[in-house]
Image: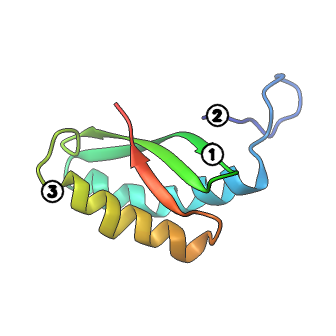
Amino acid sequence: MTGCNCGSCGEAAPSGLEARVQEVIQTIRPLLQADGGDIELVSIDAEEGKVFVRLQGACKGCPGAAMTLKMGVERHLKEKVPEVTEVVAVQ
């Protein structure tokens, strides 16, 4: 998901929920990158509180990716953004 805050390029600025989710992902990203991976926000279902992400690099296909997703990313997002109920990895 992208969003520009310049106001002149035509892209919509991220919603409040999306901006907060992106902020948390930015704090998690360096930890994943240190292990050769990365994470990308794909979409958010605000109605159900589901956040869809794509794991990349070493995280993609890693046996520990499910644990990283649930015990790391999901736990952290739920703590910081109470509207989040679940984080789902997509391909």
Closest to the camera, between mark 2 and mark 3, is 3
Q: Position of residue 79 (x, y in %)?
A: 53, 77
Which residue is more in the foreground, 17 or 12?
Answer: 17
As drawn, 55 above or below 86:
above
Which numbered disc, 2 or 1, marks the residue that appears first in the sequence? 2
Residue at the disc numbered 1: 45
Q: Nearer the viewer, mark 2 or mark 1?
A: 1
Q: CA distance from mark 1 to mark 3?
A: 25 Å
6 over 37 or under it: above or below: above
Circle 3 — which element? loop
Whole-percent x, y for residue 59 in the image? 22, 45
To which residue does mark 2 refer? Answer: 2
Measured Cα–Cα span from mark 2 to mark 3: 28 Å
* Amino acid on which disc 1 is placed: Asp
Q: Quadrant of residue 73?
A: bottom left
User: Could you tell me which secondary element the residue under label 2 belongs to?
Assistant: loop
The residues bearing labels 2 and 1 have C-alpha atoms spaced at a distance of: 16 Å
Residue drawn at (77%, 55%) of the image: 16
Give the residue drawn at x 33%, y 63%: 70
Left or right relative to 40: residue 57: left
For the point 49% across and 44% down, the residue is: 52
Mark 2 neighbour class, 10 Å CA radius: few under 14, some 14 to 19, many 20 or more: few
Q: Amino acid at mark 2?
A: Thr
Are the residues flagged by discs 2 and 3 in contact, CB closer than 8 Å?
no
Label 1 crowd (10 A; few <14 / some 14-19 / many >=20): few
User: Could you say which disc has been placed on residue 64 in the image?
Assistant: 3
